[in-house]
């Protein structure tokens, strides 16, 4: 049976992301600060932000960027990121956001796959970006090494080009996700997908102009992109940007800038619950903490709530759903601890028994049996770029996205993520596709075969572990981990190695990850 959202449908305006977020500016909010860097004296107002967005869109058009082109954005969170992201959309182009910690090889793969024709980076990260595109197609925000800078672009004083965007089909963003299997793929999200997810969640993740939002989760990841970058701007809240998570800087700025709303992933919850520094800061301005991207332990959530004196709730989502499908509503205190919340408006879902393929019925009392969560709605991607097979495997003919997560639902419609069917590993909330690490390990001269799974560390956090069949007795675990670490972004490092005689595989050659987990 299909489970529908407990909320009435909301209207999804037929607008581009830009018109949806900024169409009614200048209004009363124009003079308000839209975004300020942590620790900065002065921020960018909504009026200034829209001026910058127009100038950036005009500069892109002057460099030959036309609707449908793909522009890569490679930058830590900053006020400039906000203007650049929306400037690219305003020009009718598609943004592919690049993880700021990616190595040159990882970036090269994404740019080539996405077909990016222009890239924007920052001086500190530019060595990994340069060399993939002609130099004149790389803008460096702070103008390092004689490249064009953001100031150069804005000094041209251009206006936005006039472009036609059909929200239902025009690709807004191409974030990368491995989905349920294989390598990272470009997730095709339209303007309508992004507009829908803000419209679906604004009544549940209640943000308003009085809120100051700590934007420490990266804007390049879908959680930061929709919930921080778009939802906060739609609400006319103020974003306080952090280039990275540094606990002392984070606590200092949250206290000094009186942040009200923290969006976090579970490792930050751990720091908030345990670290002695927390007691040295006045965090009384914080009324809500929302965690997502990986499971948040209920006891840990309670510890954070007690220590900070605020609500701690969870949301669940996936890049392929723009991303939010479930979230605990701000005004409901009866949702059980550990739940990822209720299905958001305009969505339907199913829980499907992976063994029988049959639907699991929602209970009239107590908790349902576990099943794979399938979701349908206006926020679900149109598919993976250039990979029809992966699209067909993930998105069925009825428009249900097969999440690869195992969930249960209680009689009140609260969902719980209880297991993961897919091979994806999450390290600190970031995706680690095992297939990518397995391919890399196989490129090592002393590795004959390899399989990678997620295992819990001492803190219960998931870490990537490689099972390796070595062809030389001289290969040691530490050396192999160091070899991998040189070639991947830090979150993808292999953190455990076990040498084995053979990798368990099915008759068709598929790695039997369950058998490895059982060891
Ligand atoms: N509990 C258990 C969770 C949870 C979870 C995600 O990198 P992606 O594709 O996307 C994300 C999106 C996270 C997110 C979006 C919106 C939101 O409100 C929120 O909470 C505030 C979080 O991480 O990874 C998707 C996969 O990450 C796991 C799950 O396996 C999912 O398929 N995941 N959230 N609360 N697991």
Image (cartoon, grey):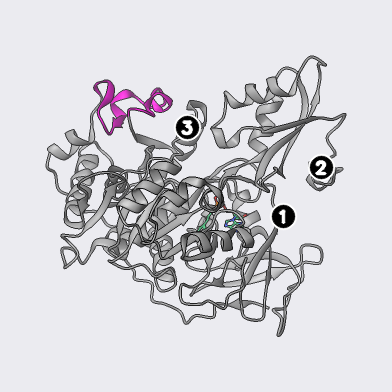
User: The C terminus is located in which quarter?
Assistant: top right
User: Compared to 421, does 353 lie above or below?
Assistant: below
Instruction: Residue under label 1, please give it.
Output: 421
Count neighbours of disc 3 (C-alpha within 10 A) and say few if under 14, some if 14 to 19, many if 20 or more: many
The reply, left or right, for residue 38 in relation to residue 358 is left
Res. 170 in view: no
Residue at left offset 36%, top offset 52%? 254
Query: Regarding mark 2 in the picture, which secondary structure is present there?
Result: helix
Query: Regarding mark 3 in the picture, which secondary structure is present there?
Result: helix
Q: CA distance from mark 1 to mark 2?
A: 14 Å
Instruction: Residue under label 2, please give it.
Output: 516
Count neighbours of disc 2 (C-alpha within 10 A) and say few if under 14, some if 14 to 19, many if 20 or more: some
Residue at left offset 32%, top offset 54%? 239
Percent coordinates x, y for residue 133 in the rendering = 38, 27
Residue 46: mark in rendering: none
Percent coordinates x, y for residue 481 in the rendering = 67, 26
The part of the image, by quadrant, that contains residue 228 is bottom left
Ligand 1 is found in the corner quadrant, namely bottom right
Along the line of sight, which residue is nearer the eye, 115 or 371?
371
Q: Nearer the viewer, mark 3 or mark 2?
A: 2
The part of the image, by quadrant, that contains residue 147 is top left
Is there a contact, CB below 8 Å, between mark 3 and mark 1? no
The part of the image, by quadrant, that contains residue 117 is top left
Res. 334 in view: yes
Residues rendered magenta in the picture: 123-146
Q: CA distance from mark 3 to mark 2?
A: 31 Å
Count neighbours of disc 1 (C-alpha within 10 A) and say few if under 14, some if 14 to 19, many if 20 or more: some
Residue 107: mark in rendering: 3
Query: Regarding mark 1 in the picture, which secondary structure is present there?
Result: loop
Residue at left offset 19%, top offset 60%? 32
Percent coordinates x, y for residue 176 in the rendering = 51, 45
């Amino acid at each position: 049976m299909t489970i529908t959202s407990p909320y009435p449908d909301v209207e999804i305006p037929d607008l581009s992301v830009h018109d949806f977020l900024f169409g009614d500016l200048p209004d009363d909010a124009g003079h308000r600060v839209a975004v300020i860097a942590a620790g900065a004296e002065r921020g960018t107002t909504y009026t200034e932000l829209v001026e910058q967005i127009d100038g950036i869109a005009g500069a892109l058009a002057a460099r030959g960027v036309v609707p449908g082109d793909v522009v890569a954005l490679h930058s830590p969170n900053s006020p400039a990121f906000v203007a650049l992201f929306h400037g690219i959309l305003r020009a009718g182009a598609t943004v592919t956001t690049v993880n700021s910690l990616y190595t040159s090889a990882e970036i090269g793969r994404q740019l080539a796959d996405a077909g990016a024709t222009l890239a924007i980076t920052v001086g500190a990260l530019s060595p990994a970006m340069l060399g993939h595109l002609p130099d004149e197609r790389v803008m460096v925000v702070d103008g390092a090494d004689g490249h064009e800078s953001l100031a150069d672009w804005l000094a041209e004083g251009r206006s936005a080009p006039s472009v036609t965007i059909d929200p239902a089909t025009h690709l807004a963003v191409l974030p990368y996700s491995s989905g349920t299997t294989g390598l990272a793929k470009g997730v095709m999200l339209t303007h309508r997908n992004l507009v829908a997810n803000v419209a679906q969640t604004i009544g549940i993740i209640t943000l308003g102009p009085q809120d100051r939002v700590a934007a420490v989760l990266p804007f390049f990841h879908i959680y930061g992109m929709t919930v921080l970058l778009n939802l906060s701007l739609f609400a006319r809240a103020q974003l306080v940007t952090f280039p990275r998570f540094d606990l002392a800087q984070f606590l200092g700025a949250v206290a000094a800038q009186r942040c009200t709303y923290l969006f976090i992933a579970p490792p930050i919850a751990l720091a908030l619950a345990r670290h002695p520094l927390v007691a040295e800061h006045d965090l009384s301005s914080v009324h809500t903490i929302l965690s997502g991207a990986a499971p948040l332990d209920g006891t840990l959530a309670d510890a954070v709530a007690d220590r900070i004196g605020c609500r701690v709730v969870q949301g669940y989502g996936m890049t392929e759903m723009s991303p939010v499908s479930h979230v605990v509503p701000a005004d409901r205190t009866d949702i059980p601890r550990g739940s990822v919340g209720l299905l958001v408006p305009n969505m339907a879902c199913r829980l499907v028994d992976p063994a029988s393929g049959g639907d699991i019925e929602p209970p009239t009392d107590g908790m349902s049996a576990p099943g794979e969560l399938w979701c349908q709605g206006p926020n679900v991607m149109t598919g993976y770029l250039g990979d029809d097979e992966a699209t067909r495997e993930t998105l069925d003919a009825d428009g249900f996205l097969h999440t690869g997560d195992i969930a249960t639902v209680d009689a009140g419609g609260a969902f719980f993520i209880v297991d993961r069917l897919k091979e994806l590993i999450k390290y600190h909330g970031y995706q680690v596709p095992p297939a990518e690490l397995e391919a890399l390990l196989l490129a090592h001269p002393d590795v004959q075969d390899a399989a990678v799974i997620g295992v819990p560390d001492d803190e219960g956090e998931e870490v990537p572990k490689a099972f390796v069949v070595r062809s030389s007795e001289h290969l040691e675990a530490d050396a192999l981990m160091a070899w991998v670490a040189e070639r991947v972004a830090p979150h993808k490092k292999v953190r455990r190695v076990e040498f084995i005689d053979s990798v368990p595989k099915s008759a068709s050659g598929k790695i039997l990850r369950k058998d490895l987990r059982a060891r």
